[in-house]
Image (cartoon, rainbow, N blue to C red):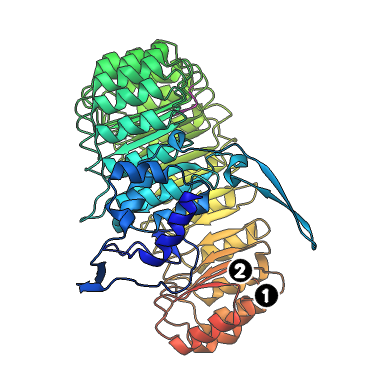
Amino acid sequence: MFVGAVLADLRSSVGFSGDDELYPGGFLSTGSHVDVYCPPSKRARISSPFAFAGSCFEQEKKSSIEVLPDECLFEILRRVQGGKERSASACVSKKWLMILSSIRMAEICKNQATDKVVESSDDVEMIICDEDQNLQSDGYLTRCLEGKKATDIRLAAIAIGTSSRGGLGKLSIRGSNSVRRVTNFGLSAIARGCPSLKALSLWNVPSVGDEGLFEIAKGCPLLEKLDLCQCPSISNKGLIAIAKSCPNLTALNIESCSQIGNEGLQAIGRFCSKLQSISIRDCPLVGDHGVSSLLSASAMMTKVKLQALNITDFSLAVIGHYGKAITNLNLSGLQNVSEKGFWVMGNAQGLQKLTSLIITSCRGTTDVSLEAVGRGCANLKQMCLRKCCFVSDGGLVAFAKVAGSLESLQLEECNRVTQTGIVGALSNCGTKLKSLTLVKCMGIKDITSEVPMLSPCTSLRSLSIRNCPGVGSVSLAMVGKLCPQLQHVDLSGLYGITDAGVLPLLKSCEEGLVNVNLSGCLNLTDEVVLTLARLHGGTLEVLNLDGCRKITDASLVAIADNCLLLNDLDLSNCAITDSGISVLSCAKQINLLVLSLSGCSEVSNKSMPSLKKLGETLLGLNLQHCKSITNSTVEQLVENLWRCDILA
């Protein structure tokens, strides 16, 4: 009763000061979500004058309750019960908000729920005291603060506002307000008010240090996922506190944290037995002792990502021996790891469950070590090699022979691999390889001498050769003969290829192509599209011709007549005109969902009726950089095609 009387008196006598985030009779803004609620009230009865200072009104004379020490206000406010009541109290002033956010959930005084039956002549109603007694803090709410919206005040509001509405489960803070930064105080408020927190992500918050993590460890024992990126003030001490108090931790991501090193990782390995995923990148204090201790102690570890670390062959040997549960492994920028490290990792025979392996910019990846990895990882299905400059044709072929479960192979900027290595790998990969991706491999070039044709790869369904300038007609024709069951073909960025190289590939595909990307192939003509539509029109669903400047309306006629299942068509920067769009719109069986005409200068306002007709099925239409289509035409299309997203 005392608290209720105090609040009633304050609604009419207390002023608001100095913070534009507090709004009487409404909500306290917390970014993308609203958390602290203050019910609307009548006009305030101002009993004392206000002085105008800057953009804020400040009450000259404080209410009697405002002169109480913080300790007294703490005792009063911890007796305020109910989510709405606590939110209303938080909106009284910044001081009350901060005091409320300092109260732990366990410190809130709760009365026993009592049922009072109030009888009247009209009805009988049940009044349940302390309405929050039956609310469970399951932690299903998610909050994300970015940039200027990331302040301590908003975190305090989130801590108070979510406590009675299911509880905060996930919190992400990305960046920080340049003036009022997120500090340990804001994180402490979350720790006190959100014991249900299970996932915490801190990106580029330099003012948050170990004290904030101490509070999270103390108040959020259910924490399962922790993501720390560019947090220079957080050290091993904070991570050790999390390790000791959060035994349910399953995922840990540490990136560019200059003060976190081996001691923190050793504590995680010692106390967090449920850890399943670890990602460590660009942490100069992390070395072999931390990584090896963590991996050798984590029996449930399934995903490991190590990038730009000062680790050596010893760490990879530990991975190969103790990584019995690892299914996904990503190793990048490990400059101190030699050929021996990868060789031992493969021959240790511990990575029997490994299904996905990504290796980027590691000098230790050679022909010898690659073969050892392929032999030691019996269940490896996905292999990606990026910028591995010492891998050549011999190592690739040897790897393909021993990796019997391989389904996907990706090579990016592996410049020692030539056409001979690709043909040899395809012929020796067994019967499970389904996808081959080659990106910026400068060593792959057409060769004049005839390459011996080995057994075809009948299992390959997807072929992607992107931005490999040396690939020409000879290479494509050879791949077409080797892989007759292709369904997905991506040749984007191969500006050197011509019809003579693509046509044999199209004719070799026996199953029927579903997805074809020819963007950036500047020299292809209508002959390719005509052949594609004739041979694969019954199966083709996606066609990308962006930048094929020799493609004209003749291709649209073939598409309209043959491509019955086509739903995504990109004609950006092609030489099509209004006539081609008209033909396409008259096709009775075509049902396009996405159409891109970006940069088609010959398409004008005359195409509006055709576009309206196509719009009956379209969900996306791109008209950017169409200089002959005016703004008024675009506005009419937007008005008529209300279910279609139009870019202009």
Asked if the stretch drawn in magenta spans residue 588, the answer is no
Cβ atoms under marks 1 and 2 closer than 8 Å: yes
Q: Nearer the viewer, residue 441 or 597?
A: 597
Asked if the stretch drawn in magenta spans residue 357, the answer is yes
Disc 2 residue crowd, few under 14, some 14–19, many 20+, Cα 10 Å: many
Label 2, secondary structure: give it: helix
Q: Which quadrant would residue 409 be assigned to in this image?
A: top left
Q: Which residue is mark 1?
A: 587
Please report whichever mark, 1 or 2, sits nearer to the chain's N-terminal start.
2
In percent of width and height, residue 27 lies at 44, 62
Label 1, secondary structure: give it: loop
353 vs 599, left or right, is: right
Kindly report the distance in space between the C-alpha atoms of the residues bearing marks 1 and 2: 9 Å
Q: Nearer the viewer, residue 539 or 97?
A: 97
In percent of width and height, residue 461 lies at 57, 42
Q: Which residues are magenta?
A: 354-358
Mark 2 residue type: Ile
Q: Which quadrant would residue 541 be assigned to in this image?
A: bottom right
**Vertical order, 593 against 232 (above or below):** below
**Vertical order, 555 against 387 (above or below):** below
Q: Quadrant of the C terminus?
A: bottom left
> Which is the main secondary structure of the residues drawn in magenta?
strand
In percent of width and height, residue 196 lies at 49, 36
Q: Which quadrant would residue 640 be assigned to in this image?
A: bottom right
Q: Which mark is residue 559?
A: 2
In percent of width and height, residue 301 lies at 45, 21
Give the residue drawn at x 31%, y 30%.
214
Give the residue drawn at x 35%, y 52%.
96
Disc 1 residue crowd, few under 14, some 14–19, many 20+, Cα 10 Å: some
Does residue 445 appear in this view? no
118 vs 177, left or right, is: right
Mark 1 residue type: Ala
